[in-house]
Each structure stands twice: as C-alpha cells, then as structure tokens.
Amino acid sequence: MDEESLKEKKKQKLLKAGYEARARARKEKEKEREEKEREEKREEDERENDFKGWSKRLWEEHAVCLTLPLNRIRLS
C-alpha cells in the first residue's frame, strides 16, 4: 500500500471510531433518561398511593441532609 492509501485507511478508522463513540454516548444517554423516567414514575406512584409514607421519607431525607453539615462542624 502506498502512503496515500494508508492515510485514507487511518482517516476511515478514526471516522468509524468517532461514529461508534457517538452512538454509544447516545445509547447511554437514552438509558439514563429511561431510568430517570422510571424513577420519577415510581416517586409519583408512591406519592399518590402512600402519601404519608412518601412524606415521611422525604422528611427523613431532609433531616439527614441538614444534620450532615452540623456533624462535620462538630467534628472539626
């Protein structure tokens, strides 16, 4: 193979690799979007079917978020 055909082959490999990387990124992004939709649906169902349990869970998560910085300050 001459030098020109080697350059063209290398160029085609790079183009293919870029195309495949973009396709993988699109697929991963779609997967993440679907997972987020499932989580939002689950959250909405829980809120509608067990409001007290949902509310309590949110309150507990909020309390944990508030106490973590206080614990760090106390440890310092």
Image (spheres, rainbow, N blue to C red):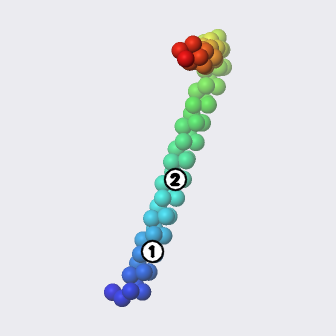
Q: Nearer the viewer, residue 75 or 18?
A: 75
Residue denoted by label 1: 12
Q: x, y percentage for residue 4?
A: 42, 86
In the picture, which quadrant includes the C terminus? Answer: top right
Q: Nearer the viewer, residue 52 or 59?
A: 59
Q: Nearer the viewer, residue 45 or 66?
A: 66
Tell me the kind of residue under disc 1: Gln
Task: Examine the rendered structure and indicate whether residue 42 appears above or below residue 55.
Answer: below
Comparing 44 with 75, the one in front is 75
Residue in the image at 38% along x and 81% along y = 6
In this image, 4 relative to 28: left or right? Answer: left
Task: Rate crowding at label 1 as few (under 14), some (14 to 19) or many (20 or more) other CA atoms within 10 Å.
Answer: few
Residue 39 seen: yes
Residue of label 2: 25
Q: Quadrant of residue 42?
A: top right
Residue that lies at the very extreme toward the bottom in this rendered image:
2
Among numbered discs 1 and 2, the one appearing first in the sequence: 1
Q: Residue 69: which numbered mark, if any?
A: none
